[in-house]
Image (spheres, rainbow, N blue to C red):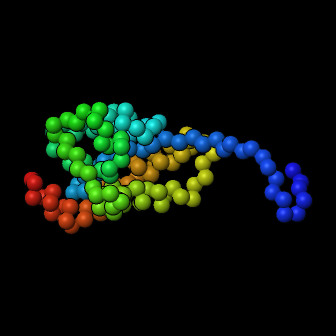
Amino acid sequence: MLTLAGVKPIGQVQWKRDNFYLYGVVEPLTGDSFFYEFSHLDSTCFQKFINLVSAKFTDSLIIMQMDRGKIHQSSMLDWQEFIIPIFQPPYSPELNPIERFWEHLKAQLKWHNCPCLDELRAILKKALEEITPSVISSLTGWDFITDALRSLT
């Protein structure tokens, strides 16, 4: 569309956006981890994630640190007795160990331009498979966290 100089053309554009959400937990001491993809970021999917984590780590005491998002604090959530939710102070993602892991993962993906979600899933799956527990532990295992975890055992 052509317009006069200085006149902005008017048009309707609706960009199609597809997405998915990767939920995850990491164990800073050992680098053990669990990730699962969901279609939404809501309390229903989060409850399913809690159930999956519970099934995977049945013999563990799980301290799950989270931000204060509504999905994490829903009164509808059914927490297993061996999962202890801890909510960090508002606006302090730097206190959550998994945030450094997410930064590391995003840095590996930032130059990929995926034409579809399936390609992004494949690249993400490969990146997750290549990250070793020792790398996860080095990213998330700050001294004050590992010292606290060691004192529990």
- The residue sitting at 25% across, 61% down in the picture is 141
Q: Is residue 55 visible?
A: no
Q: Residue furthest front?
A: 7
Question: Is 52 on the left-hand or right-hand side of 110?
Answer: left
Q: Point out residue 106 in the picture as x, y percentages from the top left corner.
A: 47, 57
Question: Is 126 on the left-hand or right-hand side of 9?
Answer: left
Task: Tell me which corner region of the image, top left, top right, bottom left or bottom right, holds residue 15.
Answer: top right
- The residue sitting at 19% across, 61% down in the picture is 146
- The residue sitting at 25% across, 48% down in the picture is 64
Task: Tell me which corner region of the image, top left, top right, bottom left or bottom right, holds residue 89.
Answer: bottom left
Q: Point out residue 88 in the picture as x, y percentages from the top left corner.
A: 27, 55
Q: Is residue 111 above or below residue 115?
A: below
Q: Point out residue 71 in the picture as x, y percentages from the top left corner.
A: 36, 41
The residue lying toward the viewer, choosing from 62 and 87, is 87
Q: Is residue 56 above or below residue 98?
A: above
The residue lying toward the viewer, choosing from 27 and 73, is 73
Q: Is residue 136 above or below residue 82?
A: below
Q: Residue furthest bottom?
A: 143
